[in-house]
Amino acid sequence: MLPVEIAPQVNWVGTLDPQIRVFDVIMAAPRGTTYNSYLIQGEEKTVLVELVKPAFAQDLIHNVSRIVDPADLDYIILNHTEPDHSGCLNGFLEEATGARVVCAKNAKRFVEALLNRDISPMLIEGNEEIDLGGRKLRFISAPFLHWPDTMFTYLEPDGILFPCDFLGAHYCDDRLFNDLVADYSREFAYYFDVIMRPFKSYALQALDKIAGLDIKMICPSHGPILRRDLASYIQRYRDWASLPEQGADKHLIVFYASSYGNTARMAESIALGAQETGMKVSLLDLSAVDPGQAIDQIEAADALAVGSLTINGDAVKPVWDLLSSLATLNLRGKVGAAFGSFAWSGEAPKFIAQRMTDLKMKVVGEPLRANLTPTGDDLAACRDLGRHIAEAVGQNTK
Ligand code: FEO
């Protein structure tokens, strides 16, 4: 696709990737994506904000060349260094021989690792500016959105914000602008859920930083450019990044997978023990519940207990699906417990507890196991575990 002038002397020079269906191995991209790159011409300096995925490097060079000779570029701004934006840097620098790379100070090691050489980039530490002649770039540190090196770039006086992946989406449409493309709310929300959700506190900090800016257009690195209803997009991010209100009572979610009802009985006893303290408890059968639907509940909960039968020396797939989905949440300090019935080996509870520890959860007690049908003692131990979970989260016992 050819360049598109999105504001005077500001051109989109990126590429479309309508065929991609899985992004970065982990993300579905049913509507493709775009790699947005922006060429800004001041009276004295010319700047490229973001590059593109290596496979599309020639398209980028082509697009830039239609407007300026790449050798005349003064700066290349890397708002962060993930290779879908910076992977073609090495080859691009062979064309942009006069350009200096600009990145956050803590991006330097990533740039060096990417290129296996030191290119002495201009390092942004605070709120530095670059005067382009008649307009200027300001840089806004926005770490962990979603890499530690992320920063935003703001063009004055145009009021155009380039926020890297923030406020982006995997959505491909050559009409480019949010007021021209179809409704892509689902892709916008999904992008937040997978990419930004683990960094909610950083998202709120960044939103506070840009709150005072006069923003007329938002140019993310993927998906549509926002020029209509900007406030509603920003508000959605603020709503999603804000933690849900905590109720007076603590909340435990007990997830379980059970073939013959034995692990289910253990789950019920754990739930009972916690409920007896006054704790709120949700009991969820993983054969009937999609953990993705419960993600907000999980995030707001004070404790998780996860139980699995053991098959072939391991926890079963629905349990691993749950545990892997927890990677997008910040569970540090939440209370966890593991349990499960088994026939002849019984490794599942141990693996669940280890995964919880890896997620920085506070695991209470030893993983509880019952051999086939739980005995009265087994169920009493489960009930005790429920009480211990309540104590660990500081539930006021009745
Ligand atoms: Fe689109 Fe984090 O790179």
Image (cartoon, rainbow, N blue to C red):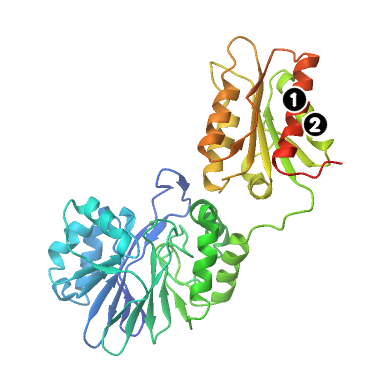
Q: Is residue 277 left or right of residue 135?
A: right
Any atom of ligand 1 within 8 Å of the CB at mark 1?
no
Q: Which residue is mark 2?
A: 273
Q: Amino acid at mark 1?
A: Cys
Q: Residue at x 63, y 47 (%)?
A: 295
Classify the position of the C terminus by image quarter: top right
Q: Which residue is mark 1?
A: 382
Asked whether disc 1 touches disc 2, contact meaning CB atoms under 8 Å apart, the reply is: yes
Q: Which of the 4 quarters of the picture holds residue 100?
A: bottom left
Vertical placement of residue 142 versus 365, above or below: below
Q: Is residue 191 left or right of residue 287?
A: left
The image's mark for residue 132 is none
SS at badge 2: helix
Q: Quadrant of ligand 1?
A: bottom left
Q: Residue at x 84, y 35 (%)?
A: 276
Q: Residue at x 75, y 15 (%)?
A: 374
Residue 280, position in %: x, y?
79, 43
Q: Which of the 4 quarters of the picture holds residue 331?
A: top right
Spatial separation of the CA atoms under disc 1 and disc 2: 7 Å
